[in-house]
Structure formats: structure tokens, C-alpha cells
Amino acid sequence: EAQVTQNPRYLITVTGKKLTVTCSQNMNHEYMSWYRQDPGLGLRQIYYSMNVEVTDKGDVPEGYKVSRKEKRNFPLILESPSPNQTSLYFCASSLLSGTEKLFFGSGTQLSVL
Amino acid sequence: GQQLNQSPQSMFIQEGEDVSMNCTSSSIFNTWLWYKQDPGEGPVLLIALYKAGELTSNGRLTAQFGITRKDSFLNISASIPSDVGIYFCAGPIQGAQKLVFGQGTRLTINP
């Protein structure tokens, strides 16, 4: 089944404790992206990747890092999480570019205490 | 930057009612996408529109690409409980490799 898989689904952590949210897609998509969803703000892009070893900032990249060492994986790294990073995070992918139809994962609800 | 404004932000309706929501922008878009997010899940694409004036249906859902290219509309006929969720409009930002999303319309249905 074609899908984007994120882990974990839920995560509670404390300020400053490094964490990684994994994302994997099995559709051989070139483009992958991370969004965060906050009430009243919709979905805002954090980082995106056009291909292996090619990443770029989205609208709200501060406090986040990403890597794209393999085509299928695009982990989101929070080196020193803060409470304002409490949010619902979505990984997404599309065949070639970020302006096409995006396929989303099921989301990761992160709480930073 | 380009922003999308959705209206209304939330709707509370009775089962069986029709639903209308819209999405507007101060900028022109060449594509309009409508996504639905079920509770606890990621958004799923419902309808894609590629041409001004285009009217496209997907079951009980109908979406329209506004003539001015600055707006789009989504209608749901004869709502059922599984229509509950958040509906997002989205459009591509050319040269920026991303979709910009509206704030969402949250639909609640009373049985």
C-alpha cells in the first residue's frame, strides 16, 4: 500500500531534550516536506527536500533540522525543543515537486513541557 | 506572501444539510486543491482544479475554480456523519516549491 509513515504518533518530552520524528514513503517520490498544524493557522511548511541531499527552509524553519540521506526517508530533528514547538506535525511527499498533489502521513502530536 | 483565507472557520449543521465553504486570496492561483482531514489523520486530497471556471465533482462534493482565479468554492450535498473533519484549500506557490494552505473549515454534524 502506498503510504507516508510517521513515527511516533504521539510524543511528550521536556524542554531541551533532543528528539527525532521519522518519516518514510514507499512511493519513490522525489519531493518530501514537513508541515506543522496549529489551531487557526492551518498548515505551515517547516522544511522541504527536492531530492537526496537537497533540503531547503520553508516558512517556519527556526528550531528544526532535517536530512535527506535516502530518497525514502526525511526525518525531522528538534535539537533543543521548546514549548512553542508543541504542535501537530505532518510529513508529506509528492512525485516531483511541492506544487503537486501532496500525500500526507497520519501526523505526530508533540507536546513539549 | 500569498495567503489563503477560508470561510467560515467552523460550521455546525444537521445531518442531511448542504454545506458551502470558500477560499479567497489576494493573489492569482493556477491550481486549487481541496483537502479533508479526518480526526486523528493527515489531510487527504479530495479535488484538484486546474482551470478558471472549472467545476469538478467527487461524489457528493463539488468544487469550483473561480473565474477571477482568486477564489474557490467547495459544496457538500446531503451531509452525512463521515463528512465531519477539517477542510483545507491549498494552492501552489510557483518558484517556492510548496503549497500554501488556508486556515481550514471545521465541519461538525449533529445526527
Image (spheres, coloured by chain):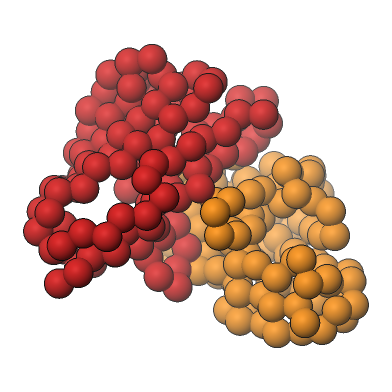
Q: Identify the chain drawn in orange.
A: A
Above or below, comparing residue B13 to residue A58 in the picture: below
Using the rendered view, name the quadrant where residue A77 is placed.
bottom right
Q: Residue at x 37, y 55 (%)?
A: B10
Would residue A49 be visible to someone looking at this image?
A: no
List x then y, in percent, for residue A104.
51, 58
List x then y, in percent, for residue B31.
44, 28
Q: Residue at x 54, y 20 (%)?
A: B27
- Left or right relative to B46: residue A28: right
- Left or right relative to A69: residue A89: left
- Left or right relative to B12: residue B6: right
Above or below, comparing residue A105 to residue B22 in the picture: below
**Which residue is nearer to you in this view: A31 or B13?**
B13
**Colour of chain B in the image:** red
**Which residue is nearer to you in this view: B30 or A102?**
B30
List x then y, in percent, for residue B22.
35, 37
Above or below, comparing residue B71 to residue A59 in the picture: above
Q: Residue at x 62, y 64 (%)?
A: A89
Q: Quadrant of the C terminus of chain A?
A: bottom right
> What is the number of callouts on the image?
0
Would residue B13 be visible to someone looking at this image?
A: yes
**Which residue is nearer to you in this view: B64 or A41?**
A41
